Amino acid sequence: MVIPASALVRAVATVLADERSRKAVGWILLAILSPVILLIAAFCSILGGSAAHNNSALDLCFSGGTPPPDMPAEYRTYIEDIQRSFALLDNSIAAINGMVEEGDGLDSIRVKAIFYALYFGDQSPSSRAHQQFADCFVTYEEHNRTVTTTDEEGNEVETEETYTVAIPIADQETIWSNIQTALGLIITEEQRGNADSIYNLVRYGAPSGTEGWIPGAGVPFIGADGFCSPVGSGWESRVTSEFGYRSDPFTGQTRGHTGIDIAVPTGTPVRAALPGVVTTAAYNAGGYGYYVMVDHGNGMVTLYAHNSKLLVQAGDTVEAGDILSLSGSTGRSTGPHLHFEVRINGQRVNPRSYLPT
């Protein structure tokens, strides 16, 4: 049986994030795929290296550089073609960001991570319609403005002009739907998960996907007062946005942030802070994405937003440390993280006052 090179690349890349899996797959491949074991070993060495040594395929594609001379020619071709694609995407993203009037433009890492997940190992991804791909991340609106010019006699003349404004799309589900429609693709959950893993690896230095990969996330971390961290111990070092006023990542305007954001990769278990009853487990397109709310009694409610998967439903009774959901980047989110809120009698309060340290 002949295994297509692109399928082999994807199979190997899937298991590289976990060291135990890398060891296990090595013995299996040695037994059943001996004719190509040297090629696989070379590819594993390319992708298995850390970002610090700049010897992984992701590093070469996202950070640039020349593939080493001992790299198999096929993988060199894949990487060089993705590098060409990224250069074309950079041009498209720059053009779009020049049309954004308020707030931040497109997250180039997010755009490239999705492209990489869909096309690495494909034949000639640099021949794709890169502008059309980048357009899937924005909507366009026609705006009017008054323009003052000077006529031949030196008089100022005001005229109305129509121009196009690009508005970045916050909801990841809408982006995936746009890509499927515009490019005629059928996108799998595996590809979505791979895109999140790639994004996390490039943005935060660690891949996503497996429960408990963050030290301490595999078991509940409960303080002396019984309050449980939603993502285990070590949450302090992963806070990317505090409670209170901040610059909105989409509009750039200063506005209140109703909780804290904790950067965790897609698939991290999200745990209940205290015993209680689930009042909401649903999707909110306006901001929270897939979110859970738990009523703990005595006026206290906690909220967990931007999840990739909900594991409870309204009416469920939970204990402190029970897994409610898996983290993600749904709703109004720029990357995988948990938005965590504490409310007392309907008022949002700083979760840091309750989380165990």
Image: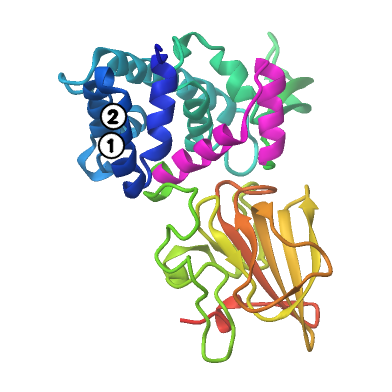
Task: Kindly identify the residue that appears in the image at 42 percent across and 61 percent down.
Answer: 214
Is 259 displayed left or right of 30 in the figure?
right
| Front-lying residue, 249 or 287 | 287
Is 270 displayed left or right of 125 in the figure?
right
Residue corresponding to mark 1: 27
Task: Kindly identify the residue that appears in the image at 50 percent across and 52 percent down.
Answer: 265
Which amino acid is tagged 2?
A: Ala
Please state the horizontal and vertical placement of residue 321, each as a whole percent of the image. Answer: 59, 75
Q: How far apart in space, not on screen, are marks 2 and 1 (Cα)?
A: 6 Å
Task: Kindly identify the residue that appears in the image at 63 percent across and 49 percent down.
Answer: 333
Instruction: Check the image and name the residue furthest to the left.
Output: 69
**Above or below: residue 236 compared with residue 289:** below
Residue corresponding to mark 2: 31
- The range drawn in magenta is 172-201
10 Å crowding of disc 2: few (<14), some (14-19), many (20+)? few
Task: Indicate yes or no whether the magenta region holds residue 193.
Answer: yes
Please state the horizontal and vertical placement of residue 198, each as a whole percent of the image. Answer: 45, 39
